[in-house]
Image: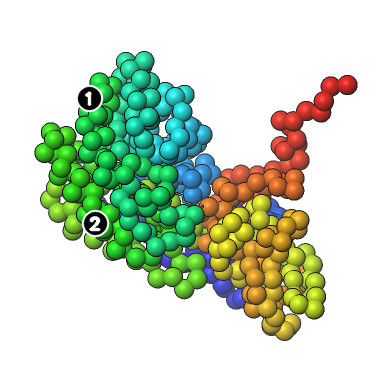
Amino acid sequence: MEPFNYRDGVLYAEEVPVPDIVREHGTPAYIYSRAALTTRYRAYDDALSDFPHLVCYAVKANSNIGVLSALARLGAGFDIVSVGELERVLRAGGEPSRVVFSGVGKQAHEMRRALSVGVRCFNVESEAELVLLNDVAGELGTQAPVSIRVNPDVDAGTHPYISTGLRENKFGIAIDDARRVYREAAAMPHLRLDGVDCHIGSQLTSLAPFMDTLDRVLLLVDQLEEDGISLCHIDMGGGLGVVYDQETPPDAGDYMAALRERLGDRALELILEPGRSIAANAGILVTRVDFLKSTEARDFAIIDAAMNDMLRPALYDAWQAIDPVALRDDVEEKDWDLVGPVCETGDFLGKQRRLRLKAGDLLAVRSAGAYGFVMSSNYNSRNRPPEVLVDGDRVHLVRRRETLEDQMGPEWVLPE
Ligand code: LLP
């Protein structure tokens, strides 16, 4: 389903004209579609309906508690990487027993909190972390459920900054060392070995690297079985890509079917941690054109959203579609560079985009529901935008626009 469509030349979010939302909430603003979140979560969940599974939405992709609450009500699990994300899940009504805790640098206080609320599993990434987790669980007189994140040394074929499954990446334990590490972990009294985990990267557009990874991980599962270590689940991480431009990623249903087939009748529950494939195309960032400025070399549209609001183009040179909110044909088409007000040359959301523009026009940056607001900052002391969740014809403000008091409140001038 396409949540953002034109009707009579005007972009709608589900049943609501985007200009109506802007009238109420201003620009820049993130707008999400509840129906799109639901459809994309269900694409995973339904494809596995008769297979033991848990879909743990990766909170880092979009951690707004309104968004999390929509997913929690569908019965989603959550993949978290900090105690902050855990508290968001709890506030949103998420079930702790459906939470997996990932990340290379978990701290003792985070482990304590996660153990005390009863998370489903810790995805452990190093031997040092195993030792700390064993100690913390011992102090609490409990056993921590553990899955070791293995690094399968598979090339995910994605952007180097978001590729995580190669030998040279900081993530996980090399798959060749994993058998030894599992044996060590099995001897730690406050750990319970539950599963095996991997995540090879993000924005993958083919299934082959996932399937190579699964083969390698299943080999390990068999070796561990020989060692008397019997695992209950396999966590394939997230990583399925989305369409930003001309990509052709497999759909979640096909991916799930391939995993199921390869898992056969092994008694292993399948856990997944999708983020982008659930949230990215469930959101847009709406911005207004403030000024048009033509130089000898370029035509610039200066818009009111900037790299602090949406970092992906500046950080990864990522391409996101940018469309007019209201179609017009009364001005000529030009190739515009869409740049923000921040004082950096890297502050652009799109370059050389063929558009018909006038000052005051609204633009929608597409595929902004994942790794959008969550990566925003206050750089240049800009207030971060509001987030709005549309549900049919209803518009819910799920985060208000920041104020300067929000920014300066936690700071103090020096005493006299
Ligand atoms: N699980 C783990 C352990 C992860 O590290 C990630 C993402 C996910 C799941 C979710 O992956 P997804 O399904 O969203 O691909 N900021 C970058 C993306 C960073 C992804 C980090 N890890 C971007 O904007 O492209």
Packing grade of label 1 (10 A; few <14, some 14-19, many >=20) is: few
Circle nearer the viewer, 2 or 1: 1
Question: Residue 325: x percent and y percent?
Answer: 64, 69
Residue 324's image quarter?
Answer: bottom right
Q: Which residue: 31% across, 26% down?
A: 144
User: In the shown orientation, is residue 230 left or right of residue 399?
Assistant: left
Q: Which residue: 80% across, 72% down?
A: 293
Look at the picture and state if 210 lies above or below 128. below
Count all numbered tags in the image, as a single digit.
2
Question: Residue 247: x percent and y percent?
Answer: 44, 70
- Residue labelled with disc 2: 259
Q: Nearer the viewer, residue 118 or 224?
A: 224
Residue 415's image quarter?
Answer: top right
Q: Which residue: 32% across, 56% down?
A: 154
Say whether disc 2 or disc 1 marks the residue closer to the N-terminus: 1
- Residue labelled with disc 1: 187
Give the amino acid at mark 2.
Leu
Residue 349's image quarter?
Answer: bottom right
Question: Residue 382: x percent and y percent?
Answer: 73, 48
Packing grade of label 2 (10 A; few <14, some 14-19, many >=20) is: some
SS for callout 2:
helix
Tell me: is circle 1 under 8 Å from ligand 1.
no
